Amino acid sequence: MTDTMIELEKLTKRYPGTEIPAVEDLTMGIPRGEIVVFVGPSGCGKTTSLKMINRIIEPTSGHIILDGEDVTKSDPDKLRRRIGYVIQQIGLFPHRRIGDNVATVPNLLGWDRDRTNERVNELLEIVGLDPEMYRDRYPKELSGGQRQRVGVARALAADPPVLLMDEPFGAIDPITRTRLQNEFLRLQQELQKTIVFVTHDIDEAIKMGDRIAILQERSIPAQFATPEEILTQPANQFVEDFVGSGATLKRLKLTRIRDIEIITDCLTGSVDEDARTLRDRLAASEWTGMLLLDEQKRPLRWLRAPDLDQGRSLREAGLPAKAFVEPHATLSDALEEMLLGSAGVSIVVDKHGVYQGIVDVDTIIITIQEMRDASAEFYRTAKLVDPAEVAG
């Protein structure tokens, strides 16, 4: 088993009647178990390159090596059953129920009914849709974000080693998009698929990618590297211009909550306790507020001293807890949630919603300073100019 899952060797696409190829001699190795993002200006050939991997678009020349096997001339239908495919428009069959949509590839592969049903239920749960509630609905009865989750479930149905994703979150509102990105990153931690992901958004590329291929016209790579390398060591002016200004803030998309020290001594209380006990604990602390947790230790409300003197039910007192992030979310996500919340912090929870700690503004400022110091030390040692200082 090699560390490279997909090898593209001089992959070229030339359409009839055109002198300039849409993709020219694309050569790249895509590591097993990583998310590789193709990003570049409109018309650079990134989607064409993606579609050649599963031969929705047939290459004019070159080779596609999948897990050591040259699949350039193999049966394209069999090839596509080995590769999951998720697109922006989702592409669900409108006349089929959700369960039948997810079961599309298993049915083509001849799985028996029990195995298929079990897989459908498992995948709907994985993407956060209760099978009892959703498998018998039709796509028109779901929101855009829910339909996109079904699209991901369908792509994973036959447990393919490779996923191709063509701007999968591009048609969704920003809040839902952020949540789906985070859910997908959580899934990838568990599934470890090899993923090729196309986007036009450099911020999404930085957040989602283990490696990023910044493509110029004809899918010629300007740089193929980790997000950190692209932000701190852009290969040329094209990459610098494409990444744009604000490199320091963009680095917040590189740091995950799980990689920093969160605040775990935030004052908390439980709905099982009485108001007087909570009030005494708050008065004896240096905190101005308390996070109320339910019986399963999931955040419910933010409480201040006056909220505990009003005789109201604890479940109705104070302000609702908002701004939740999971450990795989980025500091950029935490900052966005913080600005939308009511307490000036982001609450860290696990995948079951159980409270873990909080992230505040000071945490983010300290992390930014540490990144700047580390970058400055690197460039001081290498005797180079830090591009981040130029880009801002």
Image: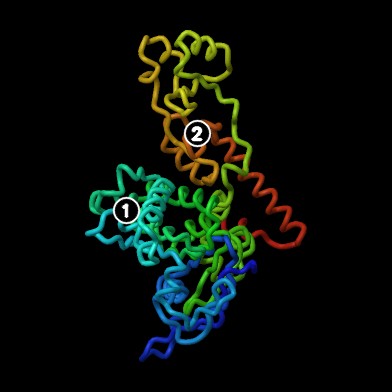
Residue that badge 1 annotates: 99
Q: Nearer the viewer, residue 336 or 47?
A: 47
Above or below, 10 against 238 in this view is: below
Percent x, y of residue 25: 53, 83
Q: Is residue 218 visible?
A: yes
Q: From the viewer's perspective, is the residue at label 2 or at label 1 nearer?
A: 1
Quadrant (top left/top right/bottom left/bottom right) for the C terminus: bottom right
Q: Nearer the viewer, residue 188 or 358?
A: 188
Q: Using a 10 Å C-alpha cutoff, classify the residue at mark 1 as few (fewer than 14 neighbours), some (14 to 19) or many (20 or more).
A: many
Q: Amino acid at mark 1?
A: Gly
Percent x, y of residue 92: 30, 60
Where disc 2 sits, the SS reads strand
Percent x, y of residue 285: 58, 15
Quadrant (top left/top right/bottom left/bottom right) for the N terminus: bottom right
Q: Nearer the viewer, residue 355 or 217?
A: 355
Taking the image as shown, residue 234 lies to the left or right of residue 298, namely right
Label 2 to label 1, Cα distance in Å? 34 Å
Residue that badge 2 annotates: 347
Q: Amino acid at mark 2?
A: Ile
Say which label, 2 or 1, has the lower sequence index: 1
Considering every residue shown, the one lying at the far right of the view is 381
Taking the image as shown, residue 295 lies to the left or right of residue 149, namely right
